[in-house]
Image (tube, rainbow, N blue to C red):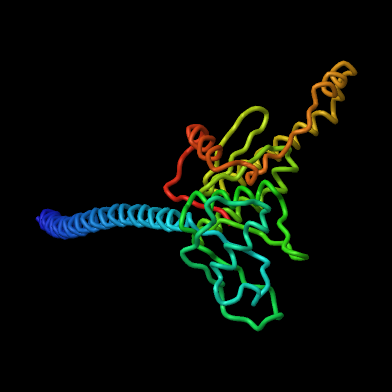
Amino acid sequence: MGKLEGIDNAMVALTAETRSMRLEIAGFQSQIFGLDQRVTTVEAQAASWTNRDQGLLHLRSSQTDLEDRSRRNNIRLFGILEGTEGADIPSYLRDMLPKLTDTTFDPPSKFQRAHRLGPKRQVGKGHPRPIIACLLRQGRARQLLQTARTQGPLRLGTLEIRLSADFSRETAERRRAFLSLRPRLRHLNVKFGLFEPARMWITKNGESRTFYDPEDLRMFLEGLHDTSQTMETTAQSSPPSQDAQDQALGARQPETVLDPDRRTPTDSQTRGRDLERLTKKYDDRGQVL
């Protein structure tokens, strides 16, 4: 009889413990369900933020593109001493540019406005501030830039004057990043050209590619550098035969670097449209200093 009572007591305790465990499990299930709902909400918010970020990037790209397009009539002039332009800068540029480029423009260049960039400085102190000028016709701005590129360094007396296109800050930074890679491109014997707005065209071993992001080009060149090192190590371990050396010497041709400034705007646009099919595209667009 005492044993049966002990078993009954144990069963009652076991039942109570089981009931308690079921309550705890139900609480855990409720918490898990609540966490699932919170995770679902967070994922939905993250997807919304991702779409919002993509929209902001698209808007930023569109803004940069619009800003660059609005600057197409502008040119920048560097090296003109402070004070030599007088009070009427457009008239000074209209008379000076034909002498500087050794070209007669018909009709003469007309400027909507022109002024110095940056805070005013005392005459003779520091580097002269650049002049930014907005021409009435976009074609004349392109003509002036192309003439300056074709003729090489432009001189006004003993001063060297440089003409440049005008671009947004983001575009200018991307172009500077591309231009900083020129020594490595020359070292690897890669033909290249920098096209507007901000894309680098390269050719290596007959294969052409276009890059819109300087970081992508940097990674690509690092891969070329690693490959060239591997090939040099293999060549040192097993010297080529005399016939192979003669064939290589006969077929070797010096690769010339394609200067982007030597291309006309029409050539650049046509080449850019053809090469855009060879690589991925980016939403953001860049431009030249």
Q: Is residue 45 left or right of residue 53?
A: left
Vertical arrangement, residue 243 with respect to residue 95, above or below: above
What count of labels does the image hold?
0
Q: Nearer the viewer, residue 220 or 96?
A: 96
Residue found at the far right of this picture: 242
**Quarter of the figure that contains the C terminus:** bottom right
Task: Give the camera-side residue of 275 and 21.
Answer: 275
The quadrant in which the N terminus is found is bottom left
In the rendered image, residue 204, in percent from the top left (x then y), is placed at 66, 33
In the displayed structure image, the side of residue 254 where residue 9 appears, left or right:
left
Question: Is 255 drawn above or below residue 131 in the view shown?
Answer: above
Please tell me which residue is depicted at 50% across the width and 52% down the height of the picture: 286
Find the residue positioned furthest to the bottom. 122
From the viewer's perspective, is residue 178 above or below residue 92? above
Residue at the image position 46 percent from the left and 50 percent from the top: 285
Q: Residue at 75% across / 43% down in the picture?
A: 187
Q: Is residue 157 left or right of residue 168?
A: right
Residue 2 appears in the picture as rendered = no
Q: Which picture quadrant has residue 127? A: bottom right
Q: Is any atom of residue 181 visible in this view?
A: yes
Q: Which quadrant would residue 208 be assigned to in this image? A: top right
Q: Which of 108 and 275 lies nearest the eye of the viewer?
A: 108
Q: Residue furthest top?
A: 243
Residue 181 is situated, as x and y percent measured from the top left of the image, at 66, 49
Q: Position of residue 210 (x, y in %)?
A: 55, 38
Q: Position of residue 156 (x, y in %)?
A: 72, 63
